[in-house]
Image (cartoon, helix red, strand yellow):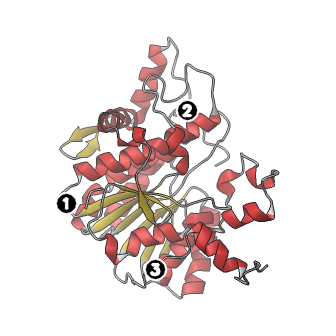
Amino acid sequence: MFCLYSKYKFPLFKIKNHVTGGRCTSKATIPGKTVVVTGANAGIGKETAHELAKRGGRIIMGCRDMEKCEAAAKEIRGKTLNPHVYACHLDLASVKSIRAFAERIKQEEQRVDVLINNAGVMRCPAWKTEDGFEMQFGVNHLGHFLLTNLLLDKLKESAPSRVINLASLAHIVGKIDFEDLNWENKKFDTKQAYCQSKLANVLFTRELAKRLQGTGVTVNAVHPGVVATDLGRHTGLHQSQFSSPFFSLLVKNPELGAQPSVYLAVSEELEGVTGCYYDVMTEKEPAPQALDEEVARKLWEASSRLVGLEEEGQTGQSSPPAEAARTESAQKHGQSPGPAVSAAGL
């Protein structure tokens, strides 16, 4: 397939479960399956790793902060009694780090059954990645675009396998500015930059699903709902006037926030379902601009150039590194490429 108590005496947790989508009802276990989760040391990623470890999976946690990642992995091993939970270094703001992580997975892991592209940054200042990309576009889209392409052969070998991209309802107001993807020539708007990156997630999902038809690898995108995690630390939303008892009913804790990812990873009813967008655990049609096949194709080509991939068939293969793209951009503006900007604060 492509594609407190109320006056009625219902406990609040039941109301909240209903409003926020509830829990994954599938009881499927995944012994023998390997799951890669990015950004897994905290928030939704950590809870996703915990739930899938509980179900028997071999969990690879890809994180930038190794101290936090090791601590999270140790905690998950202790709580689930699953010894197969591993912390690996992955900085999605660095092409070099992404390539090193992917190479390690390809060399050390026999299979990859599920790839959950969970990591992200939201409405941060005008930071740049190590390779000169706008931070949100670089981490949320380009980093996962590259990682997924580098792991495609392993995913195909492990088929039926699944790729899950964490998107956002914010994609509905996003637009892809092909003239200035990295906000080099216009006034930086962190909200619009975030929305662009989330639209890119959905476009990437649909284009990749198209390219992988017949391979046994499915690709779907999901908006997990409004979740109280560190992702929103730059917005101040949870400290605003909206942080009322009513608003708290709409905001999920990370455990509930992880349920949509778990659902897409294990649910038997999603066998063969690909190219779809889920609002929590309900399939919905994404925004019209996310359905534009020409924009999706054009974004794929632009992304391939930026991260140093060149297309061969359905997948990207190695080509000159992203430094070339950064140098080309600098020369276009009559500048020296200079040193790469480090990714601080993620």
- The answer to whether the residues at label 2 and label 3 have Cβ atoms under 8 Å apart is no
- The answer to whether the residues at label 1 and label 3 have Cβ atoms under 8 Å apart is no
Distance CA(mark 2)–CA(mark 3): 36 Å
N-term mark: 2 or 1: 1
Write the residue at 42% across / 52% down: 100
N-term mark: 2 or 3: 3
Find disc 3 in the rendering and name its residue. 84
Distance CA(mark 2)–CA(mark 1): 37 Å
Q: Position of residue 139 (x, y in %)?
A: 52, 45
Find disc 2 in the rendering and name its residue. 340
- Does 238 sit left or right of 251 as displayed? right
Few, some or many residues within 10 Å of mark 1 (<14, 14–19, 20+): some
Find disc 1 in the rendering and name its residue. 215
Write the residue at 43% across / 65% down: 36
Q: Position of residue 164 (x, y in %)?
A: 41, 60
Q: Is the residue 185 above or below the residue 210 in the image? A: above
N-term mark: 1 or 3: 3
Write the residue at 64% across / 79% down: 14
Number of the front mark, 2 or 1: 1
